[in-house]
Structures are given as structure tokens and as C-alpha cells.
Amino acid sequence: MTLNQLSFNQLNLNQLNKDEQRIYTALQSVIDPEIGENLIDLGLIYGIRIQNNIAKVTFSMTSHACPMSEIVIESIHDSVSKTLTDHIELELDLVWEPPWEPAMMSEQAKQRLGWGSTA
């Protein structure tokens, strides 16, 4: 897996500023309703960046056919919006590349789901 295929939970959190870290923390509370794990540990969050008063969250779903995608998107919006100051606009960017795969999950999520290591 190359660096651009790494999920966000595998990247260095020290790269985030304090506002971006608050967004990260908010996303840890967003649970995928089908799997019962948070989006960070599932590896569905690909990026968090605040630039020019826009907070951009780049994320994916486990599949194109995810029946709960609208609920997940609404949950991301609601959770992250609570962390933003009035002058910051939220932009959600749903992407399909790289495609999500179980290897992107944190080791903790794999253990909780009984999957063991898929690395």
C-alpha cells in the first residue's frame, strides 16, 4: 500500500493543527450504523484540512452501494459543524479512490470486529 492509499488513521496526527484535531476528535464519534465502528478506526476518513476558512473532510464509504450513506454524511456534517467557528465553512468530499478496503481499518477496529490482522 502506497502513502496515498493509507487511510487517515495511519497518518501522523501531528500534521494537524488544533482546529483540524478537533474535527478528527468529532469524527471519532461518528459511528457507521451498519458496522458499529467509528469512521476514523474504519479508515474511511482520508483527510482533514482547513484552508482559506474552509474545513474540508475527505472520506469514503465501504462500498458504492452503502445503504446508509446519507445517514453517515449527515452524521459527519452534524458532528463536525459543532466544532467549527462561525467563520469556517464545512466542505464534505466523498471520494471513491482509493477504494476502501478492510486493511485500512485500525488494528483496534479489526480486533473489535474479530477480524484479526489483515495486513
Image (cartoon, helix red, strand yellow):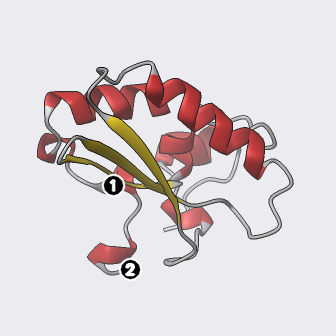
Q: Is residue 23 above or below residue 101?
A: above
For the point 58% across and 74% down, which residue is it?
96
Q: Is residue 106 above or below residue 33?
A: below
Residues tagged 1 and 2 counted as in contact (Cβ below 8 A): no
Farthest right residue?
Answer: 67
Answer with the quarter of the image where residue 64 lies: bottom right
User: Percent position (x, y) of residue 14?
Assistant: 13, 41
Residue matched to label 2: 1
Residue matched to label 1: 10
For label 1, the crowd category at 10 Å Cα-Cα, with few meaning under 14, some 14 to 19 and many 20 or more, is some
User: Percent position (x, y) of residue 90?
Assistant: 41, 40
User: Percent position (x, y) of residue 52?
Assistant: 17, 48
For the point 66% across and 36% down, which residue is it?
74
Q: Amino acid at mark 1?
A: Gln
Q: Is residue 8 above or below residue 27?
A: below
Q: Quadrant of the N terminus?
A: bottom left
Answer with the quarter of the image where residue 11 lies: bottom left
Alpha-carbon distance for marks 1 and 2? 11 Å
Q: Nearer the viewer, residue 12 or 72?
A: 72
Q: Is 96 placed left or right of 46 in the picture?
A: right
Q: Secondary structure at mark 1?
A: helix
For the point 47% across and 48% down, which residue is it?
106
For label 2, the crowd category at 10 Å Cα-Cα, with few meaning under 14, some 14 to 19 and many 20 or more, is few
* Residue 32 visible to an observer of this rendering: no
Q: Amino acid at mark 2?
A: Met
For the point 31% across and 21% down, which residue is it?
86
Say the numbered circle drawn on residue 48. Answer: none
Number of numbered discs visible in the structure rendering: 2
* Residue 102 visible to an observer of this rendering: yes
| Mark before the other along the chain sequence, 1 or 2 | 2
